[in-house]
């Protein structure tokens, strides 16, 4: 048995390569989605089997047992195609195969817009979960394949809910078909519209967060009268937590949100949940979020630990304020992820002892560091050091 894995391009004869057309005409049986089997060129065999899942396709190929078979896919076999999941099954069953590319929807949209696409972020929302906000925060236009529960309105609603309702977007509908339509507007506008099932979405890059090492200047932040983790302590916190791109992080007792903003820049494609119960602080977090374009910061206006119950499992947690609920907060984080990385800052000895007692009770190995910062202030012709409150940082690398 020889199987050809063929890309049909945009679904019309104009986007089908001559190579794929020739192989289709030679095939003794053809397997693929029903929609694609109905669009095959004239002269193709009528021995056709509708199947989309890899195991179903393999079963159909084995049942027909033809010398020359073809499996058809829309778009390109190398762009979020089911082809990648079928290949291992063919190899496992020692079935000879060859893969043939086609014209993808990203190529069709780029051509329609007269734009190159080599610098776009390519994302699939076709039958899978997709974080549109993370995609547009990577500093490049983001192209989305849509489908299933995540169509254009749903993706644009994600952007709008995050504060990106004014972001320019373009919708490509029925690309390569006679009724092809290109629609431009804002994410908020597209979230309120209805589109057909064959759509792709291009969202322009979101405004960017600062690109620099941790320890942003204190003067950058809006702070009012809310306590704020100062610059050098903040840099030490991020060094201790070790946030990585794509991670999920909690900032409990977020205050002004200064730590949340720097964490958001560090995880970039991930998410930061800023938990805060004081109204003035909540408003400041929202203001700093907008100022720094920290669209991946999710403000949780509630008191911990109850606010943590509905949050996704964290990779790392920073606790800057606990309202006397330190043990419950740490236990909530560990319950969500036993391998979570913990970092607690405190200035009171009683809080330090509380954290250490929790660690002893749960066989955690904490590392305690005191950060003492003094700034030189002018006093006449001299400069004297003015000390900030010493801060204890207690870190637990649970995955070490």
Image (cartoon, rainbow, N blue to C red):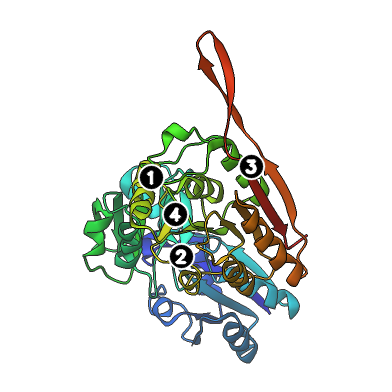
Q: Looking at the image, is mark 4 or mark 3 earlier in the sequence?
A: 3
Q: Label 4, label 2: how many angstroms apart (C-alpha)?
A: 14 Å
Res 130 label? 2
Q: CA distance from mark 1 to mark 4?
A: 12 Å
Label 1, on which residue?
288
Give x and y (percent) for residue 37.
43, 79
Quick check: 56 left or right of 18? right
Mark 1 touches mark 2? (CB < 8 Å): no
Earlier-in-chain disc, 1 versus 3: 3
Q: Is residue 94 visible?
A: no
Q: Which residue is more in the foreground, 339 or 125?
A: 339
Label 4 crowd bin: few (<14), some (14–19), many (20+), radius 10 Å: many
Chain-order first, disc 1 or disc 4: 1
Q: In the image, which disc is placed on residue 236?
A: 3
Instruction: State how far apart marks 2 and 3 are (Cα).
Output: 33 Å
User: Which mark is in front, 1 or 4?
Assistant: 1
Relative height, residue 331 to residue 268 (above, below): below
User: Circle 3 sits in a helix, a strand or a loop, which is it?
Assistant: helix
Residue at image location 61% in from the left, 65% down from the top: 99
Q: Residue furthest bottom?
A: 63
Q: Nearer the viewer, residue 11 or 331?
A: 331
Q: Residues within 10 Å of mark 2 (few under 14, many from 20)?
A: some
Gap between marks 1 and 2 measured at Cα: 26 Å
CB of mark 4 within 8 Å of CB of mark 3?
Answer: no
**Mark 4 touching mark 2, by CB under 8 A?**
no
Above or below residue 128? Residue 182 is above
């Amino acid at each position: 048995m020889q199987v050809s894995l063929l890309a049909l391009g945009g679904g019309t004869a104009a986007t089908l390569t001559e190579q794929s057309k020739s192989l289709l005409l030679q095939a003794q049986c053809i397997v693929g989605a029903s929609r694609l089997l109905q669009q095959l060129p004239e002269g193709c065999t009528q021995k056709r089997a509708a199947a989309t899942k890899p195991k179903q396709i393999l079963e159909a190929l084995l049942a027909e047992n033809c010398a020359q078979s073809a499996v058809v896919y829309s778009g390109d076999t190398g762009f979020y195609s089911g082809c990648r999941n079928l290949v291992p099954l063919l190899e496992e069953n020692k079935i000879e195969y060859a893969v043939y590319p086609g014209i993808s929807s990203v190529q069709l949209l780029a051509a329609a817009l007269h734009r190159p696409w080599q610098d776009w972020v390519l994302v699939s929302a076709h039958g899978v979960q997709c974080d549109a906000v993370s995609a547009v925060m990577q500093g490049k236009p983001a192209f989305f394949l849509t489908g299933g529960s995540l169509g254009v309105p749903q993706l644009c609603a994600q952007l709008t809910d995050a504060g990106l309702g004014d972001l320019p977007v373009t919708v490509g509908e029925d690309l390569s078909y006679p009724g092809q339509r290109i629609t431009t507007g804002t994410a908020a506008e597209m979230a309120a519209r209805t589109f057909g099932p064959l759509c792709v979405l291009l969202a322009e890059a979101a405004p960017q967060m600062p690109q620099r090492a941790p320890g942003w200047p204190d003067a950058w932040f809006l702070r009012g009268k809310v306590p704020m983790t100062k610059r050098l302590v903040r840099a030490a916190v991020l060094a201790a937590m070790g946030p990585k791109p794509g991670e999920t992080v909690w900032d409990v007792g977020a205050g002004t949100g200064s730590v949340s903003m720097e964490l958001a820049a560090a995880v970039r494609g991930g998410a930061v949940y800023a938990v805060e119960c004081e109204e003035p602080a909540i408003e400041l977090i929202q203001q700093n979020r907008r100022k720094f374009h920290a669209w991946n910061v999710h403000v949780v206006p509630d008191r911990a630990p109850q606010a943590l119950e509905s949050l996704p499992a964290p990779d790392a947690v920073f606790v800057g304020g606990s309202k006397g609920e330190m043990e419950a907060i740490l236990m909530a984080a560990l319950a969500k992820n036993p391998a979570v990385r913990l970092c607690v800052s405190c200035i009171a000895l009683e809080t330090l002892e509380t954290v250490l007692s929790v660690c002893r009770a749960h066989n955690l190995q904490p590392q305690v560091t005191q950060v003492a910062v003094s700034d030189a202030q002018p006093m006449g012709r001299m400069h004297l050091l003015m000390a900030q409150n010493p801060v204890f940082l207690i870190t637990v690398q649970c995955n070490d």
